[in-house]
Amino acid sequence: MKYRNTVVFAVLVLLFTCLATTQQAQKSKVSVAKSTRVDLSRESIGRESTKFLAVVGNWSIVDDNGKKVLAVDGRKWLRGQPAGGLAEKARAIYGSRNEEFIDNVKAWAYFPYAVAKDIDDFRDGEISMRFKIVAGQLDECAGILFNLKPNGDYLTVRFNGMEDNVVLWTFNKGVRKFVKRAPEKVPLAKNQWHTLQISVHGTSLQASLNGKHLLDYTLPEPVSGRVGVWSKTDSVSYYDDYAVTR
């Protein structure tokens, strides 16, 4: 009897070990499947990105010391205008539901942004990117756009080199509204790469710059929408290593 109990116990231990190993492997697979990094290495220099859809402003792929990166050049766009082929691009993002989207884009034509094509709905996780402020007389901005809705509403966490700060803004029904500013100013060197990251879990939003936690905010509701990169007026900014973990 004692021998049989020992055998049964050993079998149960083996089964639970196998089950735990299988569950861990499945979790690892899910984690990998939900991590997306936008690869620009095969892009064509001097052309619009095939990975980011330019909605407002002039966006293109440029060479940065031998590496292909995404750039926005506000010097060509001081008056503010939607990107070329806006109607077609709106349909590419949201199908036939694009009239309100286009109207709101025109209302915010001083805020260039481009949408990541391969990330259709970000709800929970982290978004990070590297950015470099190159130039700008009115502004020196780079930001992460998220929660982009079919009507064109969105949120952005951005760094402004003129103000040396990180701020959360909301764009809703044609109105831009300040939400929260990080309490600490962080001067950054121009023409150098820096990392901006946001973390969204439920209604909790956090933001960090170069690994330093700067901003906490409780959103009024969970996010759900497209994501991308953001700029302002005449900023000339570069973007790379855009990554989303869900």
Image: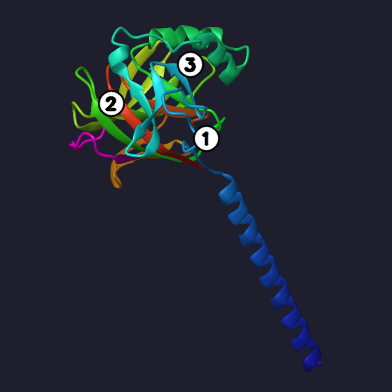
Q: Which mark is residue 192?
A: none
| Circle nearer the viewer, 3 or 1 | 3
| Region rendered in magenta | 181-196
Taking depth in this image into account, of 88 and 127 the one nearest to the observer is 88
Real-space Cα distance between discs 3 and 2? Answer: 20 Å
Label 1 CA crowd tier, 10 Å (few <14, some 14–19, many 20+):
some
Residue at screen point 37% across, 11% down:
109
Residue 77: % across, % down:
32, 11
SS of the residue at dot 3? loop
Q: Is residue 89 left or right of residue 60?
A: right
User: Looking at the picture, does residue 12 appear above or below residue 236?
Assistant: below
- Is 142 located above or below residue 11 in the figure? above
Helix, strand or loop at label 1? It is loop
User: Is 167 included in the stretch rendered in magenta?
Assistant: no
Per the rendering, the mark at residue 123 is 1
Q: Which residue is drawn at 58% across and 18% down?
A: 92
Question: Is residue 220 shown left or right of residue 188?
Answer: right
> To which residue does mark 3 refer?
152
